[in-house]
Amino acid sequence: MNRVAVIGGGTMGVGIAYVCAQAGGDVHVVEPDDTRAETMRGIIAETAAGAVKRGKLSDDEAAALESRIARVSAVADLSNGLDLIVESVFEDLDLKQAVLAEAAGKTPALLASNTSALSIDALAQAVPDKANFLGLHFFNPVWSLKLVEIVRGEATSDAAVERSRAFATWIGKESLVVRNIPGFATSRLDLIASLEAMRMVESGVTSAEEIDRAATLAYRHPVGPLRLSDIVGLDVRLDVARALEAAHGPRFAPPQILIDMVEAGKLGEKSGEGFFHWPQ
């Protein structure tokens, strides 16, 4: 599966493109915004340079990796019959359905959505060939975290699941197959910990720094739940919390501190301030 396209050049799209190129794939990233495309190029170059410094890549391998990633401005610019197209745009059902419908017109062997919470069956309503459509949920940063969550829709075929497993192995990841239940497996585990950490800050248990320090020292998490929430985006956390509250009940209700921070424009890393300060 070495002919891959990623739709969306944001944080997750960049990471997916990087690991596919690192595995030897030819990758096209659909990103209509010139500024975001330039940022994407910078992140890829910086990440590859970091891998060289750590001895993970040679200079030649880093240069080859970068050369295998090409940006196009629209889905219409993609070739027909690619091995895989991964949609990685904002977590908005209407937007994702529109993008997936256009991507399906390119008849890829496998079509996937990198959603963390939206229903695969709802997204599949925009896709004619539902048997070859599923969820591929990556984790940030994609080049470091080893899991890909494969979300199987009602119409997803066994063959599509097996191709997805093979794809995960090819890019050096472990895979987990889950049913299409709101929040899947990992998003529910991740969100419930993050919401509880927010409630601890809200009730004055201790600071955000100390809560995250507890998670990293006591449970060996690579990053604490509040810093991770800042990286994901507090607005994204709020949207997912409301969706899972509707699906699973009040245990996923967003705390008032999260609602207030989003209303104040404190969205985490992307706005420069959340539970932590993020110098631009």
Image (tube, rainbow, N blue to C red):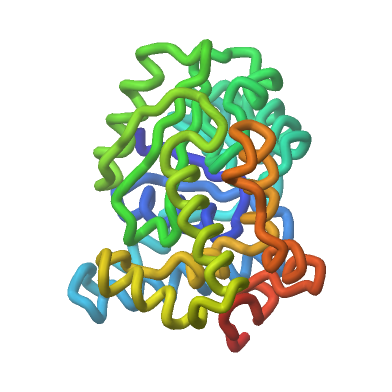
On screen, residue 163 versus residue 203, left or right, reads left
Q: 160 or 52: which is nearer to us?
A: 160
Identify the residue at image location x=30%, y=30%: 165
Q: Position of residue 132 (x, y in %)?
A: 49, 18
On screen, residue 280 versus residue 61, left or right, reads right
On screen, residue 249 versus residue 179, left or right, reads right
Q: 203 or 230: which is nearer to us?
A: 203
Instruction: Determine which quarter of the picture holds residue 55.
Output: bottom left
Q: Position of residue 128 (x, y in %)?
A: 65, 13
- Number of labels in the image equals 0
Identify the residue at image location x=73%, y=60%: 33
On screen, residue 5 versus residue 68, left or right, reads right
Q: Quadrant of the N terminus?
A: top left
Q: Position of residue 54 (x, y in %)?
A: 22, 77
Q: Quadrant of the C terminus?
A: bottom right
**In the rendered view, would you say 280 is above or below 46?**
below
Instruction: Determine which quarter of the picture holds residue 255.
Output: bottom right
**In the rendered view, would you say 15 is above or below 20?**
below
Q: Position of residue 90 (x, y in %)?
A: 68, 49
Identify the residue at image location x=45%, y=58%: 140
**In the rendered view, would you say 269 is above or below 32?**
below
Identify the residue at image location x=61%, y=29%: 119
For residue 231, say whether it is visible.
Answer: no
